[in-house]
Image: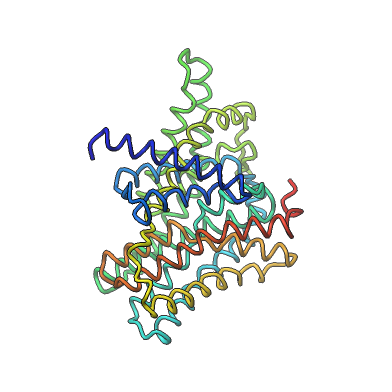
Amino acid sequence: MEAHVFFLYLLTILLAARVFAEISSHLGAPSVIGELIAGIVIGPSLLGWIEPGEILKLLAEIGIILLLFEVGLKTDGKRLLHSGFQSAVVALTGFIFPLIFGFAISYWFFGLSTLVSLFIGGTITATSIGITVRVLRDIKCQQAHEGQVVLGAAVLDDVFGVVLLAILYEFSIHGGISFFNVSKVLLFIGTFFAIAPIAAKLMSVYIKRLDEISEIPGLIPTTIVSMVLFFSWVSHSLGAPELLGGFAAGLALSRRFFIPFGLTISTDKKFARSIEVQMKPIIQLFTPIFFVYIGLSLNLREIDWNSPFIWSFSLIVFVLAVMTKMIGPFFLKESLHSKLAIGMAMVPRGEIGLIFAELGRLSGIFNNEIHAGMVIVIALTTLLSPFVMKWYHDKYASHLCDE
């Protein structure tokens, strides 16, 4: 792609994201909906102005990493630890039930092969933490108890999803699974989450000292972005999703950070606040690119709308995708409104589902009809869930988010 063409694409994405986000907000919907619709409008589905190429994908990945950094930065570590058991319950049930029921309905009802059925079950397992967090932030529920449970569960969901993706990919390529390699990946991920926040906290001490003696403005955003990218690289090197590196870095720099097991490093709340203020414009620039990119990736023109299989398959898998995510919260000792609010927040699939579906297509496991059906399911859970969450919050659950 030539430079001037890329500049035109980028300005189109940024302006479309802003315009549609403003319209969405004006209509009372979460702004993320507008950004997703912007991608659908300017992408292959409608106008066809922009294709989701590799350069845009990289910018989108930076956006999700920075979004997760902001999530970690605003996360109350003590609350997250307190809701750890509940998050684990929601994550495990929200991973196991979609996988089992997705496989079962594909294998026994639609008569698909074992590998195809496993990929279908895997595609509907992981929650889109980016979309969920953005909606929680829009409705001011990110720091509420329910928001913390969802945040922890979505992070675990992403980890489970990536591990499952690695297993299925290995199975599709080599025809066998190495349980030793799976165990090694799990060990690396656990080690990273144990060490990364402490390392980031120590690094922030030196960043603060450099900021105090530096005479050149802009040191904080430069060093913090560099640190986030470094932890994302380390996370990927250890077999974990890159976005978890951003989350770990943000969590460590939070004003409410808490290291378990009695190890404490003092937090300068003024410095932490300075990080939030100086990083916000960078985060607000990149994160809309991520959500527009999801819309660009949903090519609705490729779907044969006259196929009866597409409609029956999509409808049944969509119902499964919603219901299997709603089961987990009912294992918690919470009010009915709280259970429903948590369940709804776990429904969006977004980028993780698209990764599964695209891998299935590229590896030849999904034919065009199955791939199109999975894209419909992902699109419906991604686009409808924020509307439902916003409506339910305003009508029944606004009291849950009083912070």
7 vs 331, left or right, is left
The answer to whether one can see residue 46 in this image is: yes
65 vs 340, left or right, is left
Query: Looking at the picture, does residue 345 appear above or below residue 38?
Result: below
Depth order, front residue of 206/351: 351
Depth order, front residue of 55/299: 299
The image quadrant where one finds the N terminus is top left
Q: Residue at x 43, y 43 (%)?
A: 289
Query: Looking at the picture, does residue 179 appear above or below residue 199?
Result: below
Query: Looking at the picture, does residue 194 appear above or below residue 182?
Result: above
Total labels drawn: 0
Query: Looking at the picture, does residue 119 appear above or below residue 235?
Result: below
Q: Position of residue 240 (x, y in %)?
A: 41, 53
The answer to whether one can see residue 97 in this image is: no
Depth order, front residue of 124/256: 124
Q: Residue at x 68, y 67 (%)?
A: 332
